[in-house]
Image (cartoon, rainbow, N blue to C red):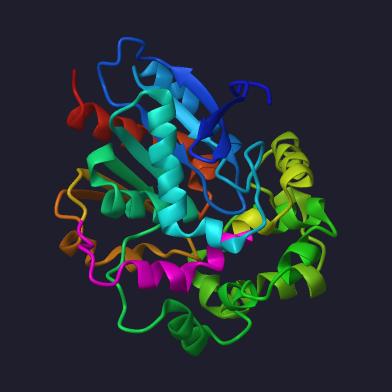
Amino acid sequence: MTDFPAPRSLKAGETNLAIYEANGDPEGRRPPVLFIHGWPEIAYSWKNQLAEFADAGFRAIAVDLKGFGRSDAPKDPALYGAGEMTGDFAALLDALGIDKAIFCGHDWGGALVWSMGQLHPKRVAGIIGLCTPLHPRPPVPPLQIIEKRFGPKHYFIQFQERDAPERLFETDLDRFFHLMFRAPAPKEKQAALLPHVYDLPGRFRDGPAPSKDNAIIPEADIQVYVEAYKRSGFHGGINLYRNIDWNWRLMEGRDETIAAPSLWIGAELDLFLPPETSDGMEKLVPDLEKHVIDGCGHWLMWEKPQEANALMLDWLKRRFSV
């Protein structure tokens, strides 16, 4: 893990979480920035952010979520709902002696930081969502909508089967991460990829071997992911998907609005979370600033780190000046 902080383990409630810290604000003049990764990522996904944020005067902390990397990885799917995961974040703040933090999340981490703003607003100083928008609670369970719109091969639906996706992906970790971390397709070719692109198990099992020349993450960094998943397995991350409808039930009757100042950054070529899916977010997030990075796919922290960091740090310095 060259150029990435060494891990330390903290007890957060009932869970041991691994954190990686670069502290550019030892006097605590600003709220710390807590970086929350998505799937199939780990805290190392923020390799291009931690040092730069510390250099800019922020305390930057990345965490391996429960089920990932060097953190505890219990098997029970019920431990991976939004209530449980955001409870981990609140307990982590307690363990670190932090009252409020700025939560920055990508992909599933993006979904969880919006949930943090809804479920634990007093612990949230600000929110940065990368790629993942916040949607109002739909009238029916989300998985029902996904299956009707995209069919039963969508990975959200296939991931509901207990143990099968984990066993499949664990057969060849190198193939899996080269399949995932690929350069995005040009805009004009994306429509032809739908909905097959969402059949991740099928593409992994039956598709051609992914070209290493097309990877957007350096080979040495991909191997960091491979080694991490040898340790943790896939069950933690896939359990997040098994809680999609449970999270929907959790929000019934709750206030969905986000009070904290918020930033959303999308990626023009993101096939999984296209920028247009953020339309209307302002209704739930009144204090929202939005940007889209051109020529960039879903893994924007790796693909366009300089552009992403510039947007985030500009917003942070304006909203949390000292």
Q: Can residue 107 be seen in this view?
A: no
Left or right of 50, for residue 132: left
**Residue 200 left/right relative to 20:** right
Residue 144 part of the magenta-drawn span? no
Residue drawn at x 24%, y 26% as measured from the top left: 317
Percent across and percent down for residue 54 are 41, 19
Looking at this rendering, what residue extends furthest in the right direction?
171
On screen, 277 above or below 257? Answer: below
Q: Is residue 300 above or below residue 4?
A: below
Residue 165 % position (x, y):
72, 68
**Foreground residue among 239 and 319:** 239
Is 246 in the magenta?
Answer: yes
Q: Residue at x 75, y 71 (%)?
A: 164
Quadrant that contains the C terminus:
top left
What segment carries the magenta color? 238-257
From the viewer's perspective, is 78 left or right of 254? right
Which residue shows up at 77% across the image and 50% down it? 212
Q: Quadrant of residue 180?
A: bottom right
Q: In which quarter of the image is the N terminus?
A: top right
Query: Is residue 162 shown to the viewer in this render?
Result: yes
Question: As rendered, which of 79 and 7 lies closer to the eye?
Answer: 79
* x, y percent for residue 189: 55, 72
Q: Quadrant of residue 157?
A: bottom right
| Furthest-top residue in this view | 27
Q: In which quarter of the image is residue 262?
A: top left
Residue 271 in the image, given as x and y percentages of width and height:
50, 66
Q: In the figure, is residue 38 to the left or right of 202?
A: left
Residue at figure coordinates x 30%, y 43% from the top left: 127
Q: Which of 5 and 275 is in front in this view?
A: 5
